Amino acid sequence: MDPYIDLLKVLLPELLITHFDIAKHEIDKDVLHLHFEEKIKIPLEFSSKTVIAHGFHKAITIQDFPVRGKKVYLHIKRRRWLDKKTKAIVQRDWDLVAQGTRMTVEFAAFLKVLNNYKG
């Protein structure tokens, strides 16, 4: 196990760490910016289709709980997928991801915002 990933799972919602990679971080005085990009792993709901990664939606920014006196902003880019047969752009259904998982009320609200954002 990667101790850094284990630490991040304590500080951030586990689903965020499971489905997104940290692209970069920035510390600017009293603000911590964490930039995430959805992993390139094809979502299970697309397993019956032929899809390829097709860039990202516009990043959304969510303020999270402060850490060590610093404001924390999560900048999250969701991946777009191209269905090669229909040429339609598709994205992961976050309601499916959340089923059967234990999460905080705050993270459930985060997923709701993320799922409704069409960027």
Image: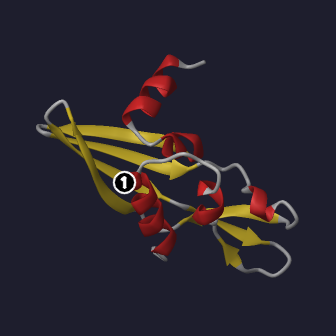
Q: x%, y% of residue 72?
A: 25, 45
Q: Quadrant of the N terminus?
A: top right
Q: x%, y% of residue 114?
A: 46, 65
Quadrant in the picture for residue 49 = bottom right
Q: Residue at x 74, y 54 (%)?
A: 42
Q: x%, y% of residue 66?
A: 21, 41
Relative to 45, residue 20 above or below: above
Q: Residue at x 43, y 55 (%)?
A: 76
Q: Secondary structure at mark 1?
A: helix
What is the image's colouring? Answer: secondary structure
Quick check: 47 left or right of 27?
right
Relative to 112, residue 3 above or below: above
Relative to 10, residue 104 above or below: below
Quick check: 59 left or right of 19?
left
Q: Residue at x 70, y 49 (%)?
A: 41
Quick check: 70 left or right of 104?
left
Relative to 41, residue 10 above or below: above
Give the residue number, with chain letter if any, for mark 1.
Answer: 106
